[in-house]
Image (cartoon, rainbow, N blue to C red):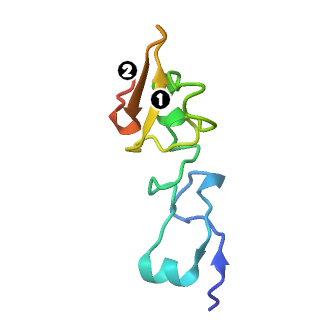
């Protein structure tokens, strides 16, 4: 067996092309390293804040988060980002604290 990176997707998921990752064969066999999207370690089309919390992601601050958008972060992240309500109020919040409809 070769120890070259394996670009094959997890055969147990039908999540899409962004669930394809590279891992050395020994990591997949010995440590069971899985899909970083499914594990919530990498944002993708199925776990990002924009997909999981579409109403709340509309409050994403257009400037204060720099070039990062709601499609670039995992919905359950404990990191803090800027948001802006319709009335103009700006506030910081962790993504994991959002309940849809906030």
Residue 5 x, y percent position in the rendering: 65, 77
**Number of marks in the rendered image:** 2
Q: Secondary structure at mark 2?
A: loop
The residue pinned by badge 1 equals: 82
Which residue is more in the foreground, 67 or 52?
67
The quadrant of the image that shows the C terminus is: top left
Q: Residues within 10 Å of mark 2 (few under 14, many from 20)?
A: few
Quarter placement of the N terminus:
bottom right
Q: Percent from the top left, x then y, of residue 6?
A: 64, 75
N-term-proximal mark, 1 vs 2: 1
In this view, the mark in front (1 or 2): 1
Q: Residue at x 33, y 34 (%)?
A: 97
Q: Position of residue 95 (x, y in %)?
A: 41, 36
Give residue 2's position: percent from left, percent from top. 64, 89
**Which residue is identified by label 2?**
102
The answer for how far apart the CA atoms under marks 1 and 2 are is 14 Å
The disc at residue 18 is: none
- Front residue of 12/27: it is 27
Neighbours of disc 1 within 10 Å: few (<14), some (14-19), many (20+): some
Quick check: marks 1 and 2 in contact, CB under 8 Å? no
Query: On the picture, is 68 further left or further right than 53?
Result: right
Q: Is residue 49 above or below residue 37?
A: above
Callout 1: helix, strand or loop? Answer: strand
Give the residue displayed 62% in from the left and 69% down from the top: 22
Which residue is nearer to you in this view: 8 or 84?
84
Which quadrant holds residue 100?
top left
| Placement of 72 over or under 90, stated as above or below | below
Residue 11 picture quarter: bottom right
Choose between 49 and 69: the one closer to the eye: 69
Q: Residue at x 47, y 56 (%)?
A: 41
Q: Is residue 101 left or right of residue 72?
A: left
């Amino acid at each position: 067996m070769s120890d070259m990176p394996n670009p094959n997707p997890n055969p147990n998921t039908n999540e899409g092309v962004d669930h394809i990752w590279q891992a050395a064969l020994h990591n997949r066999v010995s440590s069971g390293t899985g899909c970083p999207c499914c594990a919530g370690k990498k944002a993708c089309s199925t776990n990002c804040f924009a997909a999981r919390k579409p109403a709340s992601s509309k409050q994403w601050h257009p400037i204060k988060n720099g070039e990062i958008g709601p499609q670039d972060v995992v919905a359950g992240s404990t990191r803090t980002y800027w948001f802006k309500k319709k009335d103009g109020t700006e506030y910081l919040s962790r993504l994991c604290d959002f309940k849809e409809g906030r």
